[in-house]
Amino acid sequence: MTTNAERELLVRLKSGDTDAYNILYDRYSLFFYQRIRSLVKIDTIAQDILQDVFIKIWDRRAQIQEDKSFKSYLYRIAQNEVYDHYRRVSLDHRAQEEITVHMGFSFQDDTILHKEVQEHIDLAIQQLPPKQRLIFELCKIEGKTYKEASEILQISESTVNAQIVSATKKVKLYLSNSGIWSLLLLSILK
C-alpha cells in the first residue's frame, strides 16, 4: 500500500468509515496476530489481545495521525496490550495468594462461585443479537478461529472481528452492570 493510499484510509477511518477500518484490519491483523502469538504462546489469548488492539484503534481513531506510520502505531498499542496482559496475570496471581492467606479461601473447591459467574456470563451472551451471539459462541465458546467462523457463516473475517469486538463490549458491560465483576475476578484467579 502506498503512503498516499494508507493516508487516505486513515483519514476515512478517523471520520468513522467502517470499510476503511475493515481494510486496515485485513491488512495488518495476521501480521500482528503472529507477533502477539509469539509473545503469549496461546492462540485464544493472542486473539483476545489482537481484538483489544483493534478496539483501541476504533475507539481512538480521532487521535490517529495520518502522516505517521500506522504500523508503528499498531505495534506500540499491541506491545502495551501484551505488557498489560502479563501485568494482569501477575496481579491476579498475587491477589489469589493474598485472598488465600488472609481469608482461607480455596479457589480450587469453589464450584458455587463458578456456577454463579457462569450463569451471569450465559445471561450476558443471551442478550446479544442472534447473529452476533452465534459468532461469539463459535469463536469464544467453541474455540473456532475467526477464519473458521467466517467460512461457516459465509461472511468476511473482518465482519467476524467487528462482531466479536461489539459482543465482547456488550458482555463486559452486562457483567459490569450486574455487579458480577468481583466474582468474575475471583473465578479467573484459579
Image (tube, grey):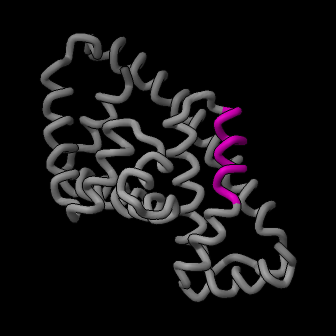
Q: Where residue 183 sits in the image (x, y, percent)? A: 24, 35
Q: Quadrant of the N terminus?
A: bottom right
Picture residue at 52% right of the left edge, 30% below the top: 89
| Overall secondary structure of the magenta section | helix
Q: Nearer the viewer, residue 31 or 123?
A: 31
Q: Quadrant of the C terminus?
A: top left
* Image side of residue 27 versus residue 100, left or right: right
Q: Is 16 inside the magenta-drawn segment?
A: no
Q: Where residue 98 sits in the image (x, y, percent)? A: 40, 19
The image shows residue 22, relative to residue 82, as above or below, that is: below
Q: Where residue 136 sits in the image (x, y, percent)? A: 33, 51
The residues colored magenta run 28-39
* Image side of residue 77 versus residue 65, left or right: left
Quarter-of-image position of residue 73: bottom right
The image shows residue 120, relative to residue 162, as above or below, that is: above
Picture residue at 70% right of the left edge, 76% below the top: 64
Q: Nearer the viewer, residue 89 or 141?
A: 141
Picture residue at 76% right of the left edge, 79% below the top: 65
Picture residue at 34% right of the left edge, 14% below the top: 100
